[in-house]
Amino acid sequence: MQVLNLQKGIENWLVSLKNKGYFPGIAVGVVIGKKLKYVRYIGYSSLNHKYEIASVTKTMTALGVMRLVEKGILDLDKPLSYYLPKVLLEKKELGSKPILLRNLLSHTSGLPDLRYYQPKVWHSPKQTGLKYPTPEQIYPTGLHYRYSNHNFMLLGSVIEVQTKQKLKEYLEKNVFLPLGMQNTIASEDILGAWGIQTTLPDLAKFASFWLERGVSNIGKKVLDVATIQKMFEEQTYIPFASKKRYIGLAWRIQSDSNCVVTFFHIGGAPGVAAWVQLFPAYQAAIVYLANPPNYENNLIGYLVALQKKLGDLAGAMVGAKESIYQFEANKLSENEYSLYVGKFKNPLTGEQIEITTLKNYVYLKTKNNQFKIIPDTTNVFHFPAYEFTFSSKSNQVIGFSDYKGFYGKLKTNKDFVDIYND
């Protein structure tokens, strides 16, 4: 009865949102093991309706990369410049290490998120031999997660160079075909970050592949378990925490005592809303695809609510005794605040910032302002619309980052704490 009530509640709610104009059509589903056990199509939607998936494309590009890693064609720990010799994006002023393929997959390459920051320096296609211009780093390699479409555009270019195939052709043969995704297509000009269309049943097959630890819906072993486990490893150090939110290779991950609780990816843009989230301990996944005319804050709030509703439904379907969707990462305790105190400087701009504590609060002080920042986790703080992510080494803070760049911790008025060596 609980399952039926949850299903009916979701369907009535989605019809209401459709009638209010949030989307012409939406498809939602719950996957248990190998099967799509619950599916509903609302509005202009059906079994074979293809939806754009925007950035969920990245997870399929990542699968393509990891297949080449298993074959020895790619090495995660080789520099990008080994595969694309003309692509040199590292900034000497940051003291940065070479960008590795691993850094591209985990969004730790140091490239900016162009939604929030427009760099002054770009490398042109004439300089790099690529199809698109590329920004330089604003963060040191490997220290900071900052989402960037260019990471997966570059991976797409690496695949094309190493396989001597168009990315579209490679993904069709090495991802869609072995996973039985017969109604999934890639655009002719796909770059690796976006450009795939799929149906809900095919997205469910993709989810099932991860639940079944590398075995596709049609019984084909596509990726080794050990390779999948590597994709779930922490790529940046997070101090003082057993319950963590972090980035693996392509996937956003939540873990408890090093066990993966859930992993997921989102796709969102005008005309696109896509989601895939997996709960490996329960052999369950939730998926949705929609085509909203506008991807704006009200809709985003409803989509977050949909994720929870589908998570609750999946939990009820597998008989979970507690919510499988709710997760709370460890937060910083007040007696650890002092470790974040110090003076910091952006090596590229020269801007200096000071972090202080007062009466059990943490403050960020610029040249002209001072404001309180609130810890969300053990390494992420926020101030209304801004987020500050601290980088640590052996529980010692070495810097922090915001959307504008990296601020290294100063050990003297001029010298930075070493960001790589102990």
Image: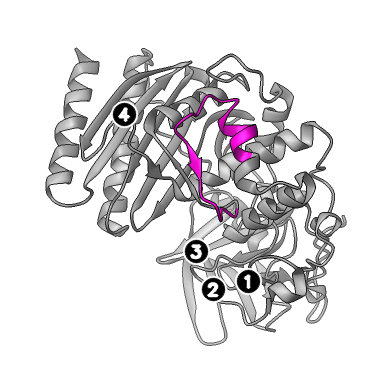
Discs 2/3, front? 2
Q: CA distance from mark 2 to mark 4?
A: 39 Å
* Residue 83: percent from left, percent from top: 82, 54
Decide whether residue 420 is among the magenta residues. Answer: no
Numbered label attached to residue 359: 3
Mark 2 secondary-structure assignment: loop
Q: Which residue is denoted by mark 4 in the rendering?
A: 47
Q: CA distance from mark 1 to mark 2?
A: 9 Å
- Graded by Cα atoms within 10 Å as few (under 14), some (14 to 19) or many (20 or more), the crowding at tag 2 reads few
Circle nearer the N terminus (2, 3): 2
Circle nearer the N terminus (3, 4): 4
Discs 1/2, front? 2
Which stretch did the figure color magenta?
Answer: 171-191
Q: What residue is drawn where x is 82% and y is 42%?
A: 75
- 1 w.r.t. 369: above or below: above
Amino acid of disc 4: Leu
- Graded by Cα atoms within 10 Å as few (under 14), some (14 to 19) or many (20 or more), the crowding at tag 4 reads few
Q: What residue is drawn where x is 63% and y is 57%?
A: 153
- Please state which of residues 228 and 146 is positioned toward the viewer in this rendering: 228
Amino acid of disc 1: Gly
Circle nearer the N terminus (3, 1): 3
Relative to 61, 128 lies left or right: right
Mark 1 secondary-structure assignment: strand
Q: Which residue is denoted by mark 1 in the rendering?
A: 405
* Residue 194: percent from left, percent from top: 52, 52
Q: Given contact means CB atoms under 8 Å apart, are the residues at marks 3 and 4 in contact?
A: no
Mark 3 secondary-structure assignment: loop
User: Is most of the magenta stretch helix, strand or loop?
Assistant: loop
Position of the C terminus, as image quadrant, is: bottom right
Relative to 419, 41 lies left or right: left
Numbered label attached to residue 117: 2
- Please state which of residues 237 and 232 is positioned toward the viewer in this rendering: 232
